[in-house]
Image (cartoon, rainbow, N blue to C red):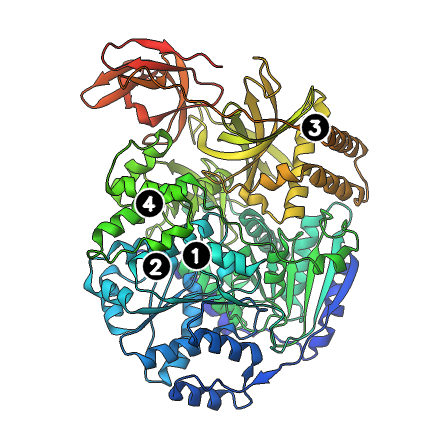
Amino acid sequence: MERNFLSLTSAGLGLLRGGQQMTQRQTPTHIARDLARAAKAVGFEVLDEVQIPGQSAQLSPVPGMLDSRVRAWLRHEYPGGLFAHQAKGIVSALKGKDICLSTATASGKSLVFLAVSAHLLHQDDKSRVLALYPAKALIQDQLKKWRQTLRHLGMEPGYIDGGVPVEARVQILAKHRAILMTPDVAHAWLLSHLRSREVAGMLQGLALVVLDEAHVYDGVFGTNMAYFLRRLQAAARQFRFIVSTATVGRPQEFVEKLTGRKPLVFDSKHDKSEIPPKTILLVRSGGGKAFESMVELLQVLAHGDLGRFLAFADSRKMVEQLVSAYGRSLAQKKGEAERTDDQCQEESEVDSTELAQYKILPYRAGYEEEDRLAIQKALEEGALSGVVSTSALELGLDIGDIGIVILLGTPPSVKAFWQRAGRCGRRKPGACLVLDDRGGIGSLPGGLKSYLKKPPEPGWLYLENRFIQFANALAAAVEATDSSENSYRREPFSSLPPQFTRFLENELSPTESVPEELYPLKQRAQAGPHHEFPLRTGIEKNFVVRQRHSPDQPRLGSLTLSQALREAYPGAVYYYMGRPFRVEEFRYRTGEINVRREKRWTTRPQLQNIVFPKFQGGLLQLRRSEVSFLAEAELQVSERVIGFLEQHGAKATAHEYNAASPYSQRPLTRFFETTGVCWFHPDKRLTSEAVAAQILGAFCSLCGVEARDLGFGTFHARPSPLGGEAPCQGPCIYDATHGSLRLTQQLADRFVEVVDRAINIIEDDDAPDADLRGALADLRDAAAQMQSAPQKREVTVPSPSGEWVTVVAPNSRGMYVGTGEPREVLVLAIRYTPDGLMYELDSEDQSVKWMVTSSSVLPINGVTELARLNLFTGEIEKIVRS
């Protein structure tokens, strides 16, 4: 039986639970004062403090429209009545409306959909309810509320997540009428089994779909979710939605884009729940020792008596390194020596007593589910003082009353700020401390008070992403084929871009060939599109990490390829639960990363991000002067790890991937198509990496885009939008999602405003960089003088006849994207074989002829020479750039 990491160390958590529990302060109103004192003691400077007043509850009677049994139960549980917005929401849903509950955290949103669900199930014994939760841990947390509600009314909910055996799922559908499920399972299993009698029966009886924590449906996950929800509507009978989210901008617009429905919204204006007061502290570190001060603050909170806390960091790596540094400090205080190499090699399990010393543990996406549940339980029961987390703990998990929230950096968005700050003070006054070293808040006119008045950003959904469209069309084609005759409805697709329907119809009744860049997806879909294209990562490859030198070989989490490039590349020191592991094997084809225990060293990837813009035919926006330009364009991006830098204390060692490397003989590459913003100016100061990094940070701060969703690299182009054949290069900030979510469109639209924000952030620094500020000011002036230019759209020249096809010219370079990892290759020759058009590629082993299908080699913008091939005569004509 496969065992996870914490199952090997459960004794450690047992020791924690068996020991002394955390002492909760009896005077919570003093928590902000004591938190400020603790922050100052470890070197933070308190810049500002804002008190957010609470509010008293306004109650209304239980709605008389409810089923009598549900009404009687609610009156018994809530003799004083319901919050006014709860009562209005229930009435609206009972009248058949789709509703969106966008009130504050802990405002009782769950009660609305629980009451409506119970009513519908009692009114019609054939009706079904499906509640979708974006995390397995959230299902287990919310299952308690569903059971408490339905058991009083003679019913029992069921749940299906990734941990429920496939063979048991049909029985759960047959036994239970209210089902809690992750959207991942609903996509991968439910909609891929429409021929099952139980699945079909459940969908035909579906009366209500609940979307809880809907703010999570953002970016790739959210865009895939929008397509999935249309596919669910196509396969099921007409049902209503109840959408619940605490923080999202323009909720009606967001939900309409997510579901295709126009909901009735209950937002902060309607919120009549009781809200405790909260204090927000804005601080910055002094002396350039922010990381050390963070660790010291965590130590004070862990071993003091201020109560339980959550600390949020914006990267998985930062979360792990903070807890690792905390663990190292504990070991040093106890006089423990660092492990020797032999001890690290021989160690197959983590000593449970080591874990028992920890009052803080990390928490992030990618952990094994059992580990995440164990951490939540330890925090809830008081075995832990606190948790350092990524955005994974923004979800409304019931982990007890948290008095303190620490934001270890300027929040990536206003939406994220309120979601994180809302985790404290849910039942009594709380305090939130925000570290603002980058000046994203302090540099605003009006500072913290101004920031708190900003509305949250809307969810980022980009339905025009062709790769996501095609992957979902492949899944929809299977669903339409598996559905009973005339039961698969097309109406829900009318709110999607027309290209999706064209893709779908072409899959059902092919009339044209699949576009070249989408053909690899078509090949992958042979294994089943529902399993091959997960909702969260879309078309990106996923990897599982395992500890090799252990009898049980426990899983140590999972990563996407883009995450692996930052955390678990060949030779990297990868951290899991605050403990270091060395990546020994990186198996791209099988999606496996094998690791062994290592010392508490750190590594940093040596990244080489090269951008190939499609300035001919792919320009989306262009502004230019005689000597400079700013362009939003379609791009190809090659992100490569070419080695890494390893840190042992003050000593740094560089390691390059080559034939002599024990870890990898070639760079690890991610190649994808997206969009981004490029700029060029002959003054190199204006296109430096420092300028681009400052603009990237300012853009994220101003527009609420998370840095993890963006990338930065150097573009190489020939010809330039300025004209002529001379090559040019400069910085590019791009959308890091395959196919693009058009996140950087705002950067092109608001470039001068973003540069102004970057200047303000520098000026707010204690020691502003005058040279960098001057370069940004000159760039702002240059951009302000640029004029919009007409965009030349690419004109496709028709082939002389159907005998001709466009190919990569012999002796030209392209990108191989077939089996195995992407790599740049040289095409030696073109062959037309019984298996179709093939390329002969230059092989590292000259004794082997390397032949691949033509669809597995993509042309690189501005690099690859194209030609036309006559399939009958073999004649090749070079295509000359216009």
The residue type indicated by label 3 comes to: Met
| Place of residue 183 in the rendered image (x, y in percent of width and height, measured from the top left) | 38, 58
Q: Is residue 269 visible?
A: yes
Name the foreground residue: 413 vs 312. 413
The residue type indicated by label 2 comes to: Gln
Residue at 53% of width from left, 41% of height from top?
Answer: 742
* Left or right position of 312 against 12: right
Q: Earlier in the sequence, mark 2 or mark 1?
A: 2
Secondary structure at numbered mark 1 = loop
Image mark for residue 233: 2
Residue topped by disc 4: 473
Residue topped by disc 1: 260
The Cα–Cα distance between marks 4 and 3, rounded to whole angstroms, is 41 Å
Q: Say above or below: 563 vs 726.
A: below
The Cα–Cα distance between marks 2 and 1, rounded to whole angstroms, is 10 Å
Quarter of the image for the N terminus: give it: bottom left
* Left or right position of 337 against 1: right
Image mark for residue 786: 3
Residue at 22% of width from left, 13% of height from top?
Answer: 872
The Cα–Cα distance between marks 2 and 3, rounded to whole angstroms, is 47 Å
Q: Earlier in the sequence, mark 1 or mark 4?
A: 1
4 and 3 marks in contact (CB < 8 Å): no
2 and 4 marks in contact (CB < 8 Å): no
2 and 1 marks in contact (CB < 8 Å): yes
The residue type indicated by label 4 comes to: Ala
**What is the count of numbered marks?**
4
Q: Earlier in the sequence, mark 2 or mark 3?
A: 2
